[in-house]
Every structure is written in C-alpha cells, then in structure tokens.
Amino acid sequence: MKLNELKAGQSARVLSIGGEGALRQHFLDMGLIPGVEVTMIKLAPMGDPMELRLRGYELTLRLNDAEKIGIELLEAAHVKAQDQEGRRPADHPGLGEEGRFHPKGTGDPLPEGTVLSFALVGNQNSGKTTLFNQLTGSNQHVGNFPGVTVDRKDGVIRGHADTSITDLPGIYSMSPYSNEELVSRDFVINRKPKAIINIVDATNVERNLYLTMQLLEMNVPMVVALNMMDELTGNGGTVDINRMESMLGVPVVPISAAKNEGVDELVRHAVHIAKYQERPLRQDFCGAQDHSGAVHRALHAVSHLIEDHAERVGLPVRFAASKLLEGDRHIEAQLQLDQNEKELLEHIALQMESERGLDRSAAIADMRFEFIEKVCESCIIKPRESREHKRSEKLDRVLTGKYTAIPVFIGIIGLVFFLTFFLIGPFLQNLLAEGIGHLGSLAARAMEAGHVNPAIQSLVLDGIFEGVGSVVSFLPLIVTLFFFLSLLEDSGYIARVAFVTDKLLRRSGLSGRSIVPMLIGFGCTVPAVMATRTLPSDRDRHMTILLTPFMSCTAKLPIYSFFVSVFFPKRAWLIITGLYLLGIVMGILAARLYKKTLFKGEAVPFVMELPNYRMPSARNVLQLLWEKARDFLQRAFSVILIATIVVWFLKSFDFRFNLVANSYNSILAELAGLLVPLFTPVGLGDWRIVTSLICGFMAKESVVSVMELLFSGGVQNAITSLMAASLLVFSLLYTPCVAAIASIKRELGGKWALYVVLWQCAVAWVAALAVRLIGSLL
Ligand code: GDP
Ligand code: MG
C-alpha cells in the first residue's frame, strides 16, 4: 500500500521511502523514515496535497510525492500508546540549574577583545525571530547573504558590545536541500562562528533535535535554547533539563522567547561557552549495540578513512563522515578523495546497507531518530494533547475544511484588501500627502523669497516633491499591508493558505506558497515583491517576482475607470473584470512559458510543516513593520530619486537645454515623437499618448492626468474607442512603475529589473496589437 491511498483518520507504519536525491533526503530529514507511524488527517479542499501527523507534528505533502512512500495499515488499537502517565516530573521544570550538570571549563579563554560571533540556528517556527529580537533589541541590520537572496539579519546582543549574532534561515537539516540549508551550512563551516545558539521548540523536541544532532557533529561550541517552555509547562509537560544536558553534552537552557524568560541565562551560557570555546562533549550517537552496530562501525570506519582529508579542507570529521555515508555529493567533491578511497567508502556503505537492511541515507536518519527517541523518552513528559493543538484542530476544521477553506480565504484576503486599500491606507496616505504638500509649499515660498533660479525651483517642486512624493505615498499601503500579513504569517495561517491553494498553482510550476505575493500584487507590486522573501526556493522566488507585474495593481484602476467611463460606459464592469482576468491569464501563460524555458530546473517539492496556530507577538510585528518601511525608503529611494530627476529633466528642457514653458517642446515630447512609429502599429501612434505612458512609468495613476493635460481635456474627441481598448490592455501589461522596478532590482539585481521592463513592454505591445487587429475585424 502507498501513503497516498491512506484515508483520513487512518494510521499506518512507513515501510519504504522511494524517490531519490534531494527530495528523498528531505523526507528522511523531516522524520519520515521506515518504521515511523503516520496518521492521515485530511486532504486539502481541492483534493491535493495531504496533511499528515507524525512525530507529534503536522506535515503536508503532495499526493504524487506520497505515492513514493510504502506503508502498512495499522489497526487503531496498534497505534503506539503515547501514554506516559505515572512518570515522575522533574524537580525544577523550567530551570536550567545554571548548568550545574554541565562542567564549566576554566581553561584558556579567547583573548580579551575577540568578537564573540554567534549563529542562531533552528527549525522554522521555533521562535528564532522572537528570540533574535529579544537578544538584540534594536541593534540589528538586515541584508542578504553574499551571492544569494536569502534573508540575513545581524545584530549585537544587548549588554554585550563585543558580540555579534546572525539569524540564519529556518532549516530542518544540514543537507543541501534548499538554498537556506546550504547557506546555513556554509555559514557554520566557513564563517566559523565562535558558537552556535540552537533554538529547539520544546513542544516538538522529537523533530527539532534532528537538526541539533547534525549541529553537534560540527564540533562548534553550542548551547541549546529550549523555547516555548511556557506552552509545554502550561499543558502539564516537563523536561528533565539536566538529564538532557548530560545526554547531549551541551548546555540546555529552557526559555520562553515570547515572554522573555530565561533569555538572560541563555546569554550567560552562550557567552561562556564561546569565550572558553567549550565544544560539545559528545558527537557520537551511534550505539555499538544498536542493530548489531552496523551503522556505528560504518561511521567510525569512514571517520578514520577521511580524517586527513577533512582536516586538510577544514571540515569537522564526524560531520563529513556522516554526510559522506548519506551520499552527499558536495562533501564528497570537497574532500578530494582518490579513486581507491572512494571505492573503500562505497564498500563500507554497501556493507552497512546489507547488515542494517536499510539504504544509506535511511540508515543514518534512523540512527539519529533512534537516539532522539531515547532522549525524549528519558527527559520529556509530554502533555497528552496540548490546548494549542486542540485549538489548532478546531480552527483547521474551518480554515482548511473542505467547503469552508476557500470562502474563508477569500473573505480574509478581501477584508485585508478592503482595510488596506480603502480604509486605513488612504487615510494615512492623505495625511502623508498633506504633510508633503505642506513641506512643498514651504519650500516654494522659501525659494521664492531667496530668488532661487527657476530651473532649480522646478526641479525641487515638480521633480523631487512630485515624483518622490508620489512614491512615498506607497509607504502607508506597504506598512498597512505588511501589518496584516505579518499577523497572518506569525499566526500560522499563511502555511494553511499554501496548503489549500497548492494544487492551483502547481500547474504553473509553482507551489502554494507563491499565492500570497501574487495576491498582494493586486494591491501593489512593491510589497508583493518584498513578500516573496518568505518563499523557500530561489527558483520559486524568481518566478513569482516575474509574475507579479501581471496582476492589476490598484494604481491601474484609475486608468481603467477613466477610459471605461468615457468610452464604454455601458459595459464598465464587464470590461474592468475582463482586464483583471486578462492579467491573470497572461500571468498563467507566462508561468507556463517560464516553466519550459527559464526555470526548467528542479522545483522544490512541497513538503511543509503546518505549525500550531499561535498568537503573534506584537513586538515581532512592529519590528517587521519598521524593517519593511526602512528597507523601502532606504533602498528604493536612490533609484526613485534618480529616475524622478531624469524624467523631470526630460520634461522641462528642450534639446538646447532651455527651460520650456510647455512640455510640448520638451526633450520628452521629442523622444516620445521618436517612439511614435513603434506605437503606430498598435494604434497608439500619438506623441501625447506615448508621453503619458512614459510618465506612467513614474506612477501609473499619472497616465490619466498627463493625458488630460496634453489633450487639454479633450481625450474623448481625440481618440477612438478602439484606441482606448488598445491603450487599456497596454497599460495593464506594460512595465511596472519605477518603485516596483526598484524593489525588483533589489531582490533580483539590475539585469532582471531591466528584463522585466523590456519583457513587460514587449508583452503589452503584442497584446495591444492583438486587440487592434481583432477590433478592426469586428
Ligand atoms: P521563526 O520562524 O523561528 O522565526 O519563529 P517566530 O519567532 O516567527 O515564532 C513563531 C511563532 O511562535 C510566533 O507566533 C511567536 O509569537 C511564537 N513564539 C515564539 N516564542 C514563543 C514562546 O516562547 N512561547 C510561545 N507560546 N510562543 C512563542
Ligand atoms: Mg522568523
């Protein structure tokens, strides 16, 4: 029987894991290994993917991936009873005993003045961001890892000026499965942080420790921060911290990042182990007796075989050995083994496989989980079922229920849009516009009084205040939208949205996670592009960003409503809806095209955890808003400012660099004149139309106002309804505005930004031509 055949409510034991390469390794890393018990919870409303429960957490995967997993059905009675009642609770649950059971070195500390660099590593949703914010306060900056667009946050621990801490992306394993995992692995190996702070979700130790075990193999000083202790103890669970410390060989500090409990103690431990370079006491978790020691002997044999190579290239030996046995190609290449050693390695692995009866990657994963089970059994008393989990199940009955999921989703997104784009956003925008207007008139009066050169006056007023002002007016929208989104994200709802919509997006080569940025694209492309940060794969991120311009942003709405009300008043709604749909259809076509051409590579499979719903922390949300706002202003400004000045210049001067009184004679008009032949085939060969489209590049709304100006209010007499139709389609599809391009440049680089400008214009041109040809036949 295969996993995809399991019915809701049924349980099964996994017998075999098919598939290959990265996907298979990912299954294993998520704890899906032969022997584990899984319970099918439900299918997504569209029938795919499925939601499973295993090792105390919820996982979603697609049916055709589940098909690769062989299972045997379990009768309800056989399901392993998780009853642990009658066990003695620990004496001091929630106290770390200040590391009484972890011997403290007094050896030679690092020289005074060394910067103690920490890496913060942990699973997704384990509370990394919350802890990072607690640790650093406001001493942090956000950036990218060199060479890849993966978020990177650095900061200084409060009260310890000689420290630096880096928040690594949330990962489940040190396998090079996604960009995030590679980045984290490279960071730990090559950047050599002085110590690791490994954050572990206490409500789900079983899965979280899998990463911990791989980190221990890195042989870097480490402290485990056992987070969410409030939730665990609140439900009657406890952890025997001291025992856990002695089993893992590193300090374990129970904390609650959200409530700022235990964080000071964590810092003391972290600083201590970093200063004294106390490495984990234990890296060897394979028992000599387990399954007649097959894995144990293989691991030790490989360790000795490659010891010299690993030392030469600076890899931790034990880490390299287990990765080699797992069949990790990156590590194999790095170690430069010779032919004979490679053959020896292969023989050792084959011997292990035949003795253990599992293939190599499964054998290693199994060894890790076996140790983890021992740790859990002897150190943790789990509550039978946590309140949070019960609550999540109840919420999920509605939020991912078969008939309710999609209406609720539409309702929530609709509400967010309504609040952002119609209620709160415009209100803030008006305030801001008034403020800027005020400043502008102040500046005008000041310049008037100082008899400033009229060209400069015009630059400041028409250029900078107008242009930058129109872009800054996006800020309230962005902040409001991100406020709601981060609430949804932090609460755990976004993961459900991905679960529900995955099937829809999959046909275009994307996964459910891309739905959110695309939807935001209907509001504004700028935050949409910024929101792609949450996507786990670089390929998905690229593709999603390239598709967002196809969604009709709210700035296009004034263009639609103006032309529709002038030219097609009877069929207004039909046409506006049609335009929105056209954008979506073109986006889908483009996605199909990308899937076959630019982004052929292997899509990251959709295997994702569905975390419990949690109350978002106000602090996280505020911090995020501040970051987004700063980010937008800082980075986008340079591009926008330059673009504004260029357009102002073109529109205010003629070719002899005289200030023109009427933009009729400006360089812009002349240039637009040059472009007219290009626009003639699509029926838009009028320099005034071309000029207004160029101005639309600054802000889409200005297409209408510029056209009104240039046609002196007589647009309806000057152009035909066929021209209007072409113009509408062209405006829908042509290049996004400069603010959007600036954020694309920031995410993907200048080349892609240029590509988007040219590609969108080309698509728009072809579509407008089609409209003209079809229209002239009618
Ligand atoms: P990350 O994905 O690892 O960065 O995790 P976040 O910091 O975003 O936290 C995920 C969720 O867990 C958020 O809703 C937090 O408010 C919540 N959370 C974080 N730490 C704690 C904690 O100590 N206790 C509880 N109850 N919730 C927490
Ligand atoms: Mg986070």
Image (cartoon, rainbow, N blue to C red):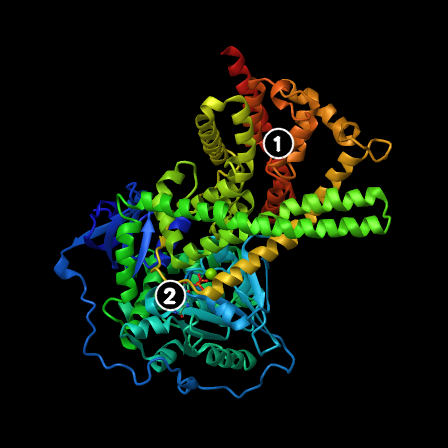
In the image, residue 80 above or below residue 106:
above
Q: Position of residue 5 (x, y in %)?
A: 22, 45
Q: Is residue 568 left or right of residue 234?
A: right
Q: Position of residue 464 (x, y in %)?
A: 72, 46
Residue 563 vs residue 356, the one in the foreground: 563
Which residue is at a point 63% across and 23% down the rendered structure image?
Answer: 715
Image disc number at residue 208: 2
Image disc number at residue 374: none
Residue 253 vs residue 557, the one in the foreground: 557
Which residue is at a point 51% across and 35% down the rendered structure image?
Answer: 550
Q: Amino acid at mark 1?
A: Val
Residue to which mark 1 is pinned = 704
Q: Position of residue 188 (x, y in %)?
A: 53, 65
Ligand 2 neighbours mark 1 (CB distance < 8 Å): no
Q: Is residue 55 left or right of residue 515?
A: left
Separation (CA) of disc 1 from disc 2: 55 Å
Q: Please say whether residue 52 is visible from this viewpoint.
A: yes
Q: Position of residue 289 (x, y in %)?
A: 28, 72
Instruction: Estimate how packed mark 1 is, as few (under 14), some (14 to 19) or many (20 or more) residues with alpha carbons within 10 Å.
Output: many
Q: Please say whether residue 176 is visible from this viewpoint.
A: no
Count of number-bearing discs: 2
Ligand 1 neighbours mark 2 (CB distance < 8 Å): no
- Secondary structure found at label 2: helix
- Quadrant of the displayed image that contains ligand 1: bottom left
Q: Amino acid at mark 2?
A: Asn
- Secondary structure found at label 1: helix
The answer to whether marks 1 and 2 mark residues whose Cβ atoms lie closer than 8 Å is no
Residue 557 vs residue 395, the one in the foreground: 557
- Res. 364 image quadrant: bottom left
